[in-house]
Amino acid sequence: MKILVCMKQVPQKDAPLKLNETATWIREDVSYEVNEPDAYALEEALRQKEKHGGEVVVITSGPARAQQVLREALAKGADRAIHLEDNAFVGLDAFNTARAFAAAIKDEQFDLIFTGLQSDDYGYAQVGVILAELLGWPHATIIMQIEKTDAGIKVKRELEAGFFQFVDMPLPAVLTIQSGINKLRYATLIGIKNAKNKPLRKVALADVQSAIGNNLQMIEKLYIPQKTKNTEFIEGPPAEVAKKLVEKLRNELRVL
């Protein structure tokens, strides 16, 4: 099977975040890493390749620094990479990001496209399903298991309250992968060495400009939550204190 994995570079979870001058995003002076759900999508693609053969291609968008995401994927076993390289890609919403990806792969013939369930920064969980709509492919979300069948694939979806759904799907299809679907592998030294010689195609903004338009979603302002501390003592007999505590937990804090 020929599988495309959409990946993203995001700020590290423990990176101290500072807002930019317009308070619409963070400053660039932070450390970055692979979006965790995308790492699970890559791992599942590599496992499907090991079972059934084929090719795994990884794609990302962003400035030159985002290429590190692709290099890590190539070191783990992906066969080649596509980089939509330009600072302007960072500011695209989910709809235009999906449009850009669709334009970049228009000459490719994939059987499956994997994305992580959502990104660790924006958390929209939209690129995968929008990409499926643009391509006219069936899609399924929150995937926990994938099995190849004679007619296509059978997937296991995670639902609420511990329930699961099993769905038979034809190919080609788009799947958004849930974190924890598998155990992530580490890149080997030989894999890191071989990654330097694997193909990496760069796509300029001008190459996909005609496919994208104005953002449909915009961030007007961000703010860093301020930490506050407020201590309140409840006095009285134990039974009365317990009753007041339960009322506060239920009505004010809403944790019960």
Image (cartoon, rainbow, N blue to C red):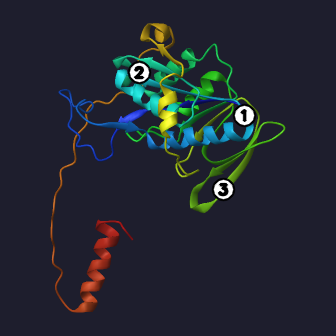
- Mark 2 vs 3: CB contact within 8 A: no
Q: Which residue is mark 3?
A: 164
SS type, badge 2: loop
Residue type marked 2: Asn
Spatial separation of the CA atoms under disc 2 and disc 3: 35 Å
Disc 3 crowd rating (10 Å Cα; few below 14, some 14-19, many 20+) is some
Q: Nearer the viewer, mark 1 or mark 2?
A: 1
Q: Quadrant of residue 29?
A: top left
SS type, badge 1: loop
Image spot of residue 196 (x, y percent):
47, 24
Q: Nearer the viewer, residue 138 or 38?
A: 38
Is residue 51 positioned above or below 27 on the image? below
Would you say 100 lies left or right of 31 here? Answer: right
Mark 2 or mark 3: name the one nearer the start of the chain. 3
Q: Nearer the viewer, mark 2 or mark 3?
A: 3
Q: Quadrant of residue 58?
A: top right
Residue at 68% x, 39% y is 50
Would you say 105 lies left or right of 72 here? Answer: right
Residue type marked 1: Gly
Q: Which residue is mark 1?
A: 53
Image spot of residue 235 (x, y percent):
16, 85
Q: Which residue is mark 2?
A: 215
Is residue 60 positioned above or below 118 on the image? above
SS type, badge 3: strand
Q: Nearer the viewer, residue 60 or 174?
A: 60
Would you say 113 lies left or right of 26 here? Answer: right
